[in-house]
Amino acid sequence: DTGVSQNPRHKITKRGQNVTFRCDPISEHNRLYWYRQTLGQGPEFLTYFQNEAQLEKSRLLSDRFSAERPKGSFSTLEIQRTEQGDSAMYLCASSFSGGDTYEQYFGPGTRLTVT
Amino acid sequence: AQTVTQSQPEMSVQEAETVTLSCTYDTSESDYYLFWYKQPPSRQMILVIRQEAYKQQNATENRFSVNFQKAAKSFSLKISDSQLGDAAMYFCAYRTYYSGGSNYKLTFGKGTLLTVNP
């Protein structure tokens, strides 16, 4: 078990470009979360998957954002027509629905800089 | 909606000393979980300690312990015998106990940056 991985770790893009991030959860984890963390703030919930189904999206997730989790394994988060306000750390976390606490394990994050 | 407040943006402690980080929260729920997460510089967030609201006993994990005051909606973290490796951003987080939609998202505070001085 290598933990939750995210790629790329850093992404610099120009305003208006599209970007895609990938998250690979711990293999047996069926729940997957995306959070966004801006400077000086704690992570904020973006969206949640149980297996391949996207069950909840935050109002923070504008129409320019889309997330997928094909086959209930890895997940991708795409941002279209990036804006400077999208600059943030994007965190992925996974958990297993068994057990009593559903502890979330976090990846190292993808830091996005929009110039 | 639940909110989590960490009123100390930064704290410092001398190595081997004890430090307490504060957290308050607001909720109308009676059952929930509270967590402290540690985020070292450029490294991933890891769980330090958790507390179930229905348990009166304060959680303890080695040098880390909490003071959970349910009526006051307060959840502080005490780090004893501080070590250089404890230097990190610490986040307090809230999670509902039961979600009909099965979304157990975390609600975080803004964090407290802990510096450990040698």
Image: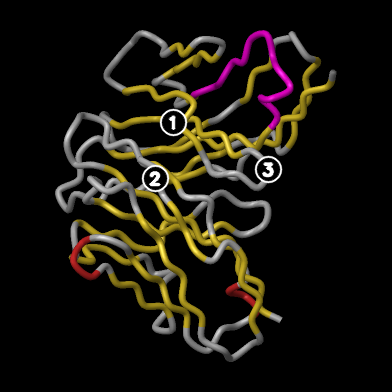
Kindly identify the amino acid type of the residue bearing the numbered disc 2: Leu
Kindly identify the amino acid type of the residue bearing the numbered disc 3: Pro
Which of disc 3 and disc 2 is earlier in sequence? 3
- The CA span between labels 2 and 3 is 21 Å
The mark closer to the camera, 2 or 3, is 3
Which label is found at residue B35? 1
> Quadrant of the image for the C terminus of chain B?
top right
Q: Position of residue A52 (x, y in %)?
A: 19, 64
Q: Contact (CB < 8 A) between labels 2 and 1?
A: yes
Q: Residues within 10 Å of mark 1 (few under 14, many from 20)?
A: many
Which label is found at residue B106? 2
Q: Residues within 10 Å of mark 3 (few under 14, many from 20)?
A: few
Q: Residues within 10 Å of mark 2 (few under 14, many from 20)?
A: many
Which of disc 1 and disc 2 is earlier in sequence? 1
| Residue interval drawn in magenta | B75-87
Badge 3 sits on which subunit?
B
Residue tagged 3:
B41
Q: How is the image coloured?
A: secondary structure
